[in-house]
Image: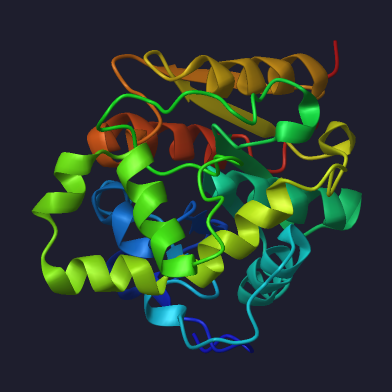
Amino acid sequence: MTPPIPLAVTEHLPGGSRGDGPLVVLVHGSLDRSDSFTRVVRRLDDLHTVVYDRRGYNRSRAALPLNVTVDGHIDDLLAIIDGRPAVVGGHSYGGDVALGAAVRGGSGSSIVSVAAYEPPMPWLGTWSRRAPGPTAGEATTGNAGAAASTDPPAAAEHFFRRMIGDSAWERLSEEGKDQRRADGPALQAELDALRGSGAPFDVTTLSVPATFGMGANSASRHRLTVEWLVGHVAGAELVEIAGASHGAHLTHPDAFAALVRSTVERAGRPVQTA
């Protein structure tokens, strides 16, 4: 598949065939990359899956201009889907992108169901902009206060150290550190967008089945956001992953893959309202 935009896209076909089901697209979070879904995709090898490095990150770093709004990332996702029936699952900021794309399409969207694992939505009022950092080992998230530096490489290092931990940063090779710093401009652009005062889309208007995931050990700001979403999005389902925190796609790939499968199973079903 060659997308109409210069992004690094990896397509996984079940048994060499596209199969009969919908396309399954996974969208990564802030300062992350598509490779973080490797173990999840292995557990979905019977499905037609697509992962990609979002604009400005890793292998898509040269895809310019950078997106300075969530809308730009939504445009990229919809271009990759290219009108095909699709199930979209997003982790962290990728969940914002997935939900925004499903909202934009409305009832005529080619997105037939959507999943979001702990999407950062500071505009809901459940997110503390100066919240304390999570425990070491918690994976990247769109923390609106995590990269206040005006130096993008320094902001990326600060974000990594804050969200994953100093020891994890020190374990990176010098090349690995340079690669993360090089993602700083994309990171800072999307965190600046999150600091905006208004909601980029109205998630309560979703008209396709939605599944929201959270970790049993996640920070309260993540759990409160997911609880709000489950309470305000018609027909939403909640999946809580035992023993997991924000980086469940890395630490609990079986459970994360099961979340994706449940979203695929809901594809195309009518949204059940209370």
Q: Position of residue 206 (x, y in %)?
A: 83, 38
Foreground: 46 or 159?
Answer: 159
Q: Report the residue at 26% width, 30% height from top.
A: 136
Left or right of residue 99, residue 145 in this image: left
The residue sitting at the front extreme is 150
Q: From what the image shows, is residue 134 above or below residue 98?
A: above
Q: Position of residue 142 (x, y in %)?
A: 55, 44
Q: Report the residue at 62% width, 34% height from top.
A: 266
Q: Report the residue at 82% width, 37% height from top.
A: 203
Q: From what the image shows, is residue 29 above or below residue 176?
A: above
Left or right of residue 83, residue 252 in this image: left
Q: From what the image shows, is residue 185 above or below residue 263?
A: below
Foreground: 184 or 67?
Answer: 184
Mark yes or no: residue 91 visible: yes
Q: Position of residue 30 (x, y in %)?
A: 49, 53
* Quarter-of-image position of residue 48: bottom left
Left or right of residue 231, residue 114 in this image: left
Total numbered circles? 0
Q: From what the image shows, is residue 78 above or below residue 205?
A: below
Q: Quarter holding the C terminus?
A: top right
Q: Position of residue 55 (x, y in %)?
A: 55, 74
Q: Report the residue at 85% width, 46% height from top.
A: 201
* Quarter-of-image position of residue 238: top right
